Amino acid sequence: MSAVGLREAGAALAAESARFAGLGWMRGTSGNLSMTLGRDPLRLAVTVSGVDKGELGADDVVVVDAAGAAVPDQPNPASRPSAEAGLHARIAEVSGAGAVVHVHMMAPVLAAQRWPDGVVLRDLEMLKGLGRGAHGDVMTVPVVPNSQDMSVLGAAFEAGFDPATPALIVARHGVYVWGEDLRQARHRTECLEWLLRFALETD
Amino acid sequence: MSAVGLREAGAALAAESARFAGLGWMRGTSGNLSMTLGRDPLRLAVTVSGVDKGELGADDVVVVDAAGAAVPDQPNPASRPSAEAGLHARIAEVSGAGAVVHVHMMAPVLAAQRWPDGVVLRDLEMLKGLGRGAHGDVMTVPVVPNSQDMSVLGAAFEAGFDPATPALIVARHGVYVWGEDLRQARHRTECLEWLLRFALETD
Amino acid sequence: MSAVGLREAGAALAAESARFAGLGWMRGTSGNLSMTLGRDPLRLAVTVSGVDKGELGADDVVVVDAAGAAVPDQPNPASRPSAEAGLHARIAEVSGAGAVVHVHMMAPVLAAQRWPDGVVLRDLEMLKGLGRGAHGDVMTVPVVPNSQDMSVLGAAFEAGFDPATPALIVARHGVYVWGEDLRQARHRTECLEWLLRFALETD
Amino acid sequence: MSAVGLREAGAALAAESARFAGLGWMRGTSGNLSMTLGRDPLRLAVTVSGVDKGELGADDVVVVDAAGAAVPDQPNPASRPSAEAGLHARIAEVSGAGAVVHVHMMAPVLAAQRWPDGVVLRDLEMLKGLGRGAHGDVMTVPVVPNSQDMSVLGAAFEAGFDPATPALIVARHGVYVWGEDLRQARHRTECLEWLLRFALETD
């Protein structure tokens, strides 16, 4: 990936991050977003760690490999990816996603407390926003326990992976949502939040 | 309708859509807005489908007929109207509305779960914002089951239509609100949201 | 009052209205704000009726007398004051306020449902924002039934008036808050909203 | 401290204040922010009292000593610090903080009502935003009764001070959060708010 191409990816990631931060879904320096840059070998552009997600610039991005480690040959080799980059990479690899959103929204974390074995959603128009049917199509959003070990989280994700369900809740932590590109991942994130609030309010 | 006139309508629809999106009432790409362009035959300008409603431009609009189908002779013939354009058209035809707002606000969907036979509102000052009386005037907002078939939804709407009640809740989906023009439809949408939140909070 | 002076008042009222509208406290075209222009005879500048309170200009203001009626000799004689201008004038007259805010916030209306005989607040730091003590000073915010007759509302206000309590809740309607000037009325409105939410959440 | 240096501090404090005001955490003129300017003797730059915290300028700042009193030799000697400056100074002295945030968020005040002996948080990823562990690390946020006497509040703070817990809730009042600099104090404030809302919602 050229420096120019990475800057473009970084600018897109920064804009989306600022949007999510404005919604209160990336409090503190929490959360991270990624775009898939290439698949052979797997390369992702991930937002840098420890920075306010409402204030990222186009250079606040780092290229990681399939293990979530920063690759040596890149424009920003000194930037530090979040440990969570490893889960981004696993999700991108398994699902084929072009973009992964990880945010600390409240609704999925509350839903995981209420339904620790998975959150069942059905018969709601907003399900169409996640590529599902509005009638009779049951979507169970998987919930996995929190961990600091991305290989543990990655294995839990993969064990419960359903290609038709582009989301994963990490209990007492946050949510991962993915899509073909950043725009679709954003839309799915927004729709999932709506669905989970509805589920919590009507339980 | 000339291309210039349609652009003006498109710009107005885009501005209102961005406003609703900012309120969180058009998550993902959900919802759509329309303006009545003519009545003989019925023609509506409807926001295009599948696009973020906070990012519409003046050209993201399509002209539809009384069935909600895109008419062939128009500036944006390739644009795709939402299937829901059919319900917009039916509402515009039956009610005489100059503008119809369809948004995925949470309050009406929660209210429909609580009161599936219709939401009764009375003795609230905010009812004046929907053209009703603040004292002793009972407004029942109809609730219809969700469907992907606009003729089914349209028939359910028409069966419960009361000219004094410019709103329709589609259960597990969202709400339609209409008025003489976009501005009035916006104001009624906002007031209805307030009323439904009040009803839910005080139930 | 000169046209220039009234424009300045109108600009200040428009700016404050836009602020409250942005907080969601003036949905539709609801609510109105006023400034006292003179006391002998009483003259108030009041925001015009029927207009989106987030979109007022400096000329969207009308001068009213002690009865809330538009005075004939003024820069905007054709503008229509809200009927509620009569209550603004009564409040300004009785309390000596320099500015009155009337908004349709949800918290006071919910509080009036819960405590129809008045909302008791005490031992909260935020009471200082309304000129009260943070310890042992009991403030009871009066609640009066809604009415379309401003002389009825005015009499109810006056019957319960306490110079140390710059607020009045109209049940199933909204709230009036006043102060020496618009800035102080704003601050008191914000603090009251906080206090009422606290009261509702901890009841 | 030179006038230029204080203006820079004032500008930073004003920007952070506006940010918190926009979140609704500094209603009315409530709350105040400070930066440590020097330690021998202790000097803090504190936002001025009685002003809307969304409208501060770079000069709306005053230099105080270890008792929270304005020092005579400073660029803005006529500015009035809040009485709460005394608690800022005590916190900065005891904790070594470079910045202290005091805001009137609702969540900590509600949490203090629910858990007057301290709010226990554990096993939540967001704890990392306050420098704590996400697993098995128990953080108890101290709660002290409200007082207008800063030496009483300061003594209560110091009695419960744990260097690993950069926050203090004042019951029926608000919260203090601190960090190495304003940015870190902001991030910790945001994360604490999330944690307290989670605790309240899942109790």
Image (tube, coloured by chain):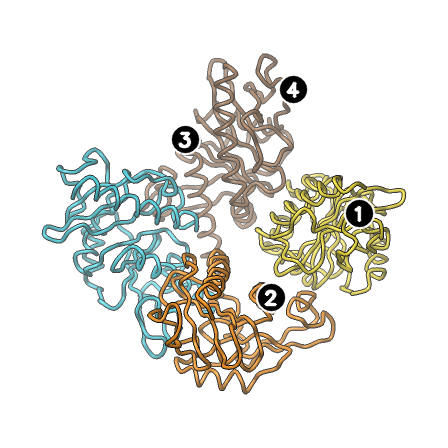
Chain colours: A orange, B yellow, C brown, D cyan
Give the quarter of the figure containing the N terminus of chain B. top right
Looking at the image, which is closer to me, C65 or D54?
Answer: D54
Tell me whether marks 2 and 4 sit on the same chain.
no
Q: Mark 4 is on which residue type? A: Ala
Labels 3 and 4: the sequence-earlier one: 4
Can residue B86 be seen here? The reply is yes
Looking at the image, which is closer to me, A84 or B180?
Answer: A84
- The residue pinned by badge 3 equals C163
What is the count of numbered marks?
Answer: 4
Can residue B132 be seen here? The reply is no
- The residue pinned by badge 2 equals A184
Chain hosting mark 1: B
Q: Secondary structure at mark 4?
A: loop
Q: Mark 2 is on which residue type? A: Gln
Q: Nearer the viewer, mark 1 or mark 3?
A: 1
Can you give x and y, in whole percent of width and height, for residue B161 in the image?
83, 50
- The residue pinned by badge 1 equals B44
Chain hosting mark 2: A
Q: Is there CB contact under 8 Å for labels 1 and 3?
A: no
- Whole-number angstrom distance, CA of label 1 to CA of label 2: 28 Å
- Is D150 left, or right, of D27 in this rendering? left
Q: Residues within 10 Å of mark 4 (few under 14, many from 20)?
A: few
Q: Residues within 10 Å of mark 2 (few under 14, many from 20)?
A: many
- The residue pinned by badge 4 equals C78
Q: Residue at x 76, y 42 (%)?
A: B3
